[in-house]
Amino acid sequence: MTLVLRILIPALTLAAASAAQASPPQYVIVSFDGAKDNALWERSLKLGDETGARFTYFLSCVYFIPTEAKAGYQAPGMRAGRSNVGFGDSPADVQVRLGHVWAAYQSGHEIASHACGHFDGKDWSQADWRAEFGSFGTVMAKAWTASGASAPAGWDGFVRRGIRGFRVPYLSTSAGLSPALAAAGFAYDASGVSRGPQAPHRQGAMTEFALPMIPEGPSGRRIIAMDYNLFVRHSGGFERASQADEFAERSYQAFRNAFDAEYAGARTPLQIGLHFQLMNGGAYWSALERLVRDVCVKPDVACVSYGDWLRANPHREADTAAAGG
């Protein structure tokens, strides 16, 4: 019996080690919508440098149009020069923002599209969406020269071939969106919402990602893992900076519990979305930064962009799609 035990114990140890090696990493996908504030560009890039995390930035193209030139943009069904989120301020502001975009791209972060004027496209046709995508491409291609600067070498190719992801404003889709995305050559759409973390799945030529609804607060009610939704729940959408610490702690615990559940379980990618706005005194940025610093440094955790996930998991995505998602 002793001899058998001496043989079995190393065998079991090797089996456990092999199982651990076979376990997929826990993916965390953090994204930012809008991406205007230059100070928050610097803050997010610094976080990436500190932790090795790589993010997806969904750009609103109006932030790359100097306000003085806003009449050059016209959204479907809107008058020229209108935007729900303003424009890029001065040409100097735009140039600094462009520098951050290029630095992010060069260091491995992903640049993706959030359309232009942040309009609710729930009634837009395929032609409307294609017009908006055309505006995005034109604005981004000409953004350097329109702000009075020279584009870096490689910018044109980046705009034409490097922006392959999309998230719709307000997470509000229409029947015309998917065919327009496919026609425009996008690889994925991150506009969905799911009850909990859900494996990405393929719909035709597109991969679809969904922000999860995660338990939050004393009652554990589910909420979309996005700062604006937390802002509305915590303070009715009104600024309460005096409670920033309380809201940051609640948000961190919600993010961390969602992470821990997947980390110890199925290891479905955890997606979290923020905006370039410091709601409730920056509570949600503080919560996210704490999470990233705590978990993205773990050896079996990969904090990646959406594009990185697609490149790392082509077979896993195909298998999920073949199994019906």
Image (tube, grey):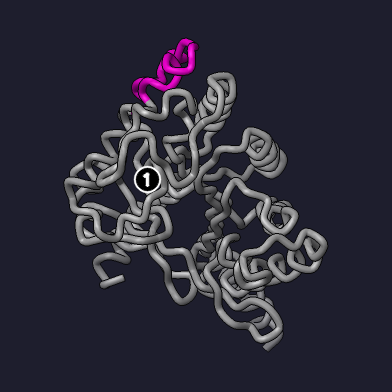
| Nearest the eye: 142 or 14 | 142
Q: Does residue 10 appear in this view?
A: no
Instruction: Name which quarter of the figure residue 134 lies in.
Output: top left
| Nearest the eye: 229 or 91 | 91
| Nearest the eye: 319 or 76 | 76
- Residue 94, position as x, y percentages in the image: 53, 25
Query: Local crowd at mark 1 within 10 Å, few (<14), some, or many (≥20)?
Result: many
Magenta region: 141-159
The answer to whether 203 appears left or right of 38 in the picture is left
Residue designated by label 1 = 165
Amino acid marked by disc 1: Gly
Tell me the residue at 69%/39% (across/down).
43
- Residue 5, position as x, y percentages in the image: 67, 82
Label 1 sits on a secondary structure element that is strand
Magenta stretch holds residue 157: yes
Magenta stretch holds residue 145: yes
